[in-house]
Image (spheres, rainbow, N blue to C red):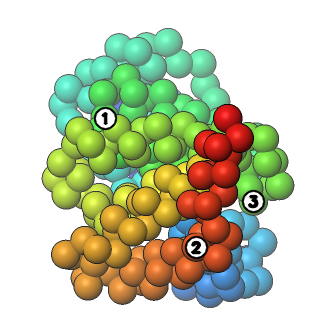
Amino acid sequence: MCIYKKKLECPVCKSKFETTKVKSSKLRVETMDTDLFKRFKDVEEHPIKYEVIMCPNCGYSAIEKHFENISKRGIAIIKENIMYKWIKQDYTDVRDKQDAIKAYKFALYEAELMKKSKVELGGICLRMAWVNRLYGDIENEYKYLDMTLKLYDKAYMEEDLMKEGADEITIGYLIGDINERLGNKKEALRWMNKIVFDRSISQNRTIEKLAREKIETLKSEDVEQEDELQAQAN
Ligand SMILES: [Zn+2]
C-alpha cells in the first residue's frame, strides 16, 4: 500500500492523533500539468487529497506545511470560532473526493478567520481545483481556478511574496497559466512575457522553460490578432 498513518500532536488542543498520508518514497512523477499539478505512477491514492491535516478533536485544519507553526493569536481564533463549537468529524482515514474537499473547505475557512495572506489562501484554492480535476469535476475545477486567480492577482500586487514563502516568478507564471485556462489568452501572453523578461528568471529554469513553451503556443494561436478582430467586430 502507498499509505501510512502519521502521528501528530495538535498545536491547538494538544491531543494526539494519527492521520493518513501517502508515502513520498512511492511517488514517481508520471506527468505534470502546465499549472504544476503532478500525476504519479502506480499509486492508488493521490497525495493532494491528504495535504490538509485536520484534528478530529478540535477541528483545527491547515495545509501540512503550515499546520504546526500556528501563532498564539491563531490558536485563540481557532479555539473561539472552531473548537468550542466543534461537533466531532473525523477525516483522518482514507479520503474520498467529498472528504478531501471538505478538509480543504475547513482549511480555507480557518485560514480566512486567521487572516492569512492572499497567496496562502490562493494556494489552498488551487489545490481544491486540482482535487476536482483529479475526479474530472470540471465545473468545480474552474470555480476554484477562478478563486485562485483573484487571490493570486491581489497577492501579486499587494503582498511581499518572498516574506510569505512564495516565489514571485512561480506565482506570476501561475497567474498566466490560469488566465489561459479560463480563456483570457491575451492576458496569459502578457504574464508569460513579463515572467521571461524578469531578471530573476535564471533562478527558475523549469518555470522559464514552461513559460517559453506557453508563449510559443499562444503566439501560434494568434492570440493578439484574435483579440484585435474581436475588438473590430465590436
Ligand atoms: Zn486539535
Label ID, residue 86:
none
Label ID, residue 219:
2
Q: Which residue is at 41% across, 60% downward?
A: 191
Q: Which residue is at 64% across, 30% downward?
A: 89
Label 2: state its secondary structure. helix
Name the residue at the front extreme: 232
Label ID, residue 116:
1
Q: Position of residue 16 (x, y in %)?
A: 43, 45
- Cβ atoms under marks 2 and 3 closer than 8 Å: no
Residue 58 visible within the image = no
Residue type pointed to by label 2: Lys
Instruction: Bin the neighbour count of mark 1 within 10 Å (Cα to Cα): few under 14, some 14-19, many 20 and up.
Output: some
Whether residue 227 sits left or right of residue 81 in the image: it is right
The one nearer the camera, 199 or 205, is: 199
Question: Where does the N terminus fall, quadrant-wise?
Answer: bottom right
Give the CA distance from mark 2 to mark 3.
29 Å
Q: Earlier in the sequence, mark 2 or mark 1?
A: 1
The one nearer the camera, 8 or 65, is: 65
Q: List the residue tagged with mark 3.
A: 134
Q: Position of residue 147 (x, y in %)?
A: 54, 37
Q: Position of residue 210 (x, y in %)?
A: 50, 79
